Amino acid sequence: MVVNPGDSFDYLPPDGRAKVLCVPVAAPWLKLSESMNYVRSTKPENVVPMHDAVLSELGKNFNNNWIKMVCDEIGAECAALDPNESLYI
């Protein structure tokens, strides 16, 4: 199952752990700590940071490092993709 919560962290996968979670890491409404908590609460197998096009390279790396830290905590893989890259699992 691929989960894309859109602009909300209210959705929790009904059948347990998601195979892939697309998690927003930058938006006017977002605090990165909320993204981190969402990853912790859903415990996906793979995480793809998204909504980061407005960030500089430094900002992307900063946010992705925090998400990767949470992935390491829960045993998930983090795939910070560049434009036109894909995730094969």
Image (tube, rainbow, N blue to C red):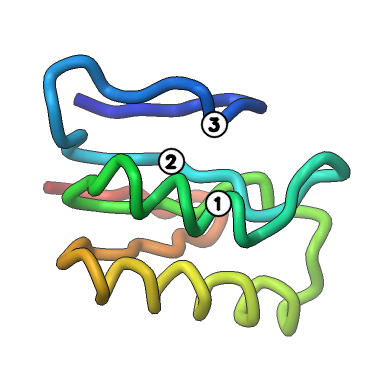
Which dot, 1 or 2, sits closer to the camera?
Answer: 1
The circle drawn on residue 3 is: none
Question: How crowded is the residue under tag 3: few (<14 C-alpha within 10 Å), some, or many (20+)?
Answer: some
Give the image location of residue 86, x and y in percent: 34, 49
22 relative position to 30: left or right: left
Q: Between residues 2 and 72, which one lies in front from this camera angle?
A: 72
Question: How crowded is the residue under tag 1: few (<14 C-alpha within 10 Å), some, or many (20+)?
Answer: many
Give the image location of residue 70, x and y in percent: 37, 69
Quadrant including the N terminus:
top left
Q: Are marks 3 and 1 in contact (CB under 8 Å)?
A: yes
The circle drawn on residue 9 is: 3
Which dot, 3 or 2, sits closer to the camera?
Answer: 3
Query: At label 2, which amino acid type do we have?
Result: Cys
Q: Residue at x 82, y 40 (%)?
A: 29
**Mark 2 = which residue?**
22
Q: Mark 1 or mark 2: which comes first in sequence?
A: 2
Q: Residue at x 24, y 48 (%)?
A: 43
Q: Give the spatial CA distance, label 1 vs label 2.
A: 10 Å
Instruction: Say above or below: 42 vs 2.
Output: below
Secondary structure of the residue carrying tag 2 is strand
35 relative position to 48: left or right: right
Query: At label 1, which amino acid type do we have?
Result: Ser
Q: Give the spatial CA distance, label 3 vs label 2.
A: 11 Å
Task: Single out the residue that lies furthest toward the top.
Answer: 14
